[in-house]
Image: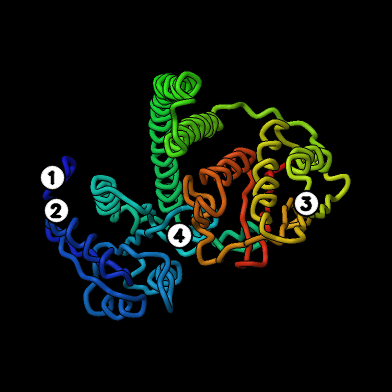
Amino acid sequence: MTYSGYTREHTGELILIVEDSPTQAEQLRYILEKHRYRVSIAGSGNAALALIGEVKPALIISDIIMPEMDGYELCRRIKAIDDCRDIPVILLTSLSDPQDVIRGLACGADNFFTKPYDEEYLLSRVMHILENRYQLRENTPLPGLDISFACQRYVITSDRRQILDLLLSTYEAAIRKNNELVRAQDELKKLNEQLQGANQELEAFGYTVSHDLRGPLNNIHGSCQVIEQIYADTFDEQCRQFFRYISEATIKMDRLIGTILKFSLLTRQELQREKVDLSDMARAILVEPRFNEPQRRVTFHIADGIIANGDMQLLRIVLENLLGNAWKYTGTKEHAVIEFGMLECGGNPAYFVRDNGSGFDMACAGMLFAPFQRLHAADEFEGFGIGLSTVQRIVQRHGGRVWAEGEPGRGAVFYFTLGLE
């Protein structure tokens, strides 16, 4: 690339780069030497001051963040040397804080340019400073101006051109950052539109797959029932067992398809936040398993008055999954204990479901919330491995997070928050 604004007027000018990062320094050297500038590099402020005493550069480009002596202090010392105060100094900065500008004015810097920078922008700054350096020498410094900013006192001694150049370069950097932000927003908007279209296609595909898979499954299941009714008298026990396997497999597949579809639609359901009594909801959820398995000895501890702000339907899915898991994984316990409660976590409420069931190894905790990942064999505990993924997706949609603690054979506890309520 050849910079279109380059002129031969400054060919051979010596530029000193003060940069403690060898990679950044060599990148600057490459750009400047490509455009016929001579370059020297100093790895620290002290090294730069020693080098300036030997060879006076036409321009100094210094990083601000350096060990021992930062760029502000280096600039201040350069401007305090009679033979060097007319050397223009450009500071490399992120300009993330207004104090950068104030400190630049206080130390007498001539310009800023921001990181990351492109080649054209860098060269435009360098050329501007070199073209105006003689005017800089003719300007008479202003009397020190005391100002207070962010509870700190600064003395500004820069002349009018330095102040103007510094403020203009700051404004230019802000405009460039704003333009980059606008471009990023436009790109994000396009990506969101593409994502929305992809989600609509995925939803349509899901319904199509559901219809196309469930139709044959229903045919298989229905045909098995008809065959059993017509030919039941001629079947031996092995044949009946095969038909039971087929029937159970089709039912399981149908349930799996329904589970996957519900999971895929969770991100599209609009949140309807309201006050939800989680205590009453937990009690209602536990009625069904207790009715279905009355022989089990299970003690429930449900804290009273736990009120949350969230989507009632989605929070019910969360509790159904967490309490359902607690019921399922305490199935081998002679006396199971399931607890639902709330505690404070970082100043916000965190809700939890605790049990004394089979638990899990914390080394495998990362697998808990991944879809279709199971820590127990299917013949030990039934399920598809998608319940906790559903919980995580709902909690994240509320702006919260979910995590778990467990120990093999000693139970588990699952916590979740709901963001700002």
Q: For the residue marked with disc 2, what is the amino acid?
A: His
Determine whether label 3 and label 1 are within 8 Å by CB.
Answer: no
Q: CA distance from mark 2 to mark 4?
A: 32 Å
Name the side, left or right, on which 420 lies relative to 60: right
Q: Say which quarter of the image contains residue 397.
A: top right
CA separation, marks 3 and 1?
Answer: 69 Å
Q: Which mark is residue 2?
A: 1
Q: Secondary structure at mark 2?
A: loop
Residue flagged by tag 1: what amino acid is it? Thr
* Mark 2 vs mark 3, CA separation in Å: 70 Å
Query: How far across and how far down the image is residue 410, in percent?
Result: 67, 67
Which residue corresponds to the image point at 44% horizontal and 62% vertical from the top-left? 108
The label shown at residue 381 is none
Looking at the image, which residue is at 41% across and 68% down?
71
Q: Is residue 189 above or below residue 30?
A: above
Query: Mark 4 against mark 1, which lies toward the viewer?
Result: 1
Residue 11, given in percent of the width and then of the height, sits at 12, 56
Q: Is residue 372 above or below residue 39?
A: above
Check disc 3 and report the residue beneath it.
340
Q: Residue 293, located in which quarter of the rendered image?
A: top right
Distance Cα–Cα, label 3 vs label 4: 72 Å
Mark 3 vs mark 1: which is more N-terminal? 1
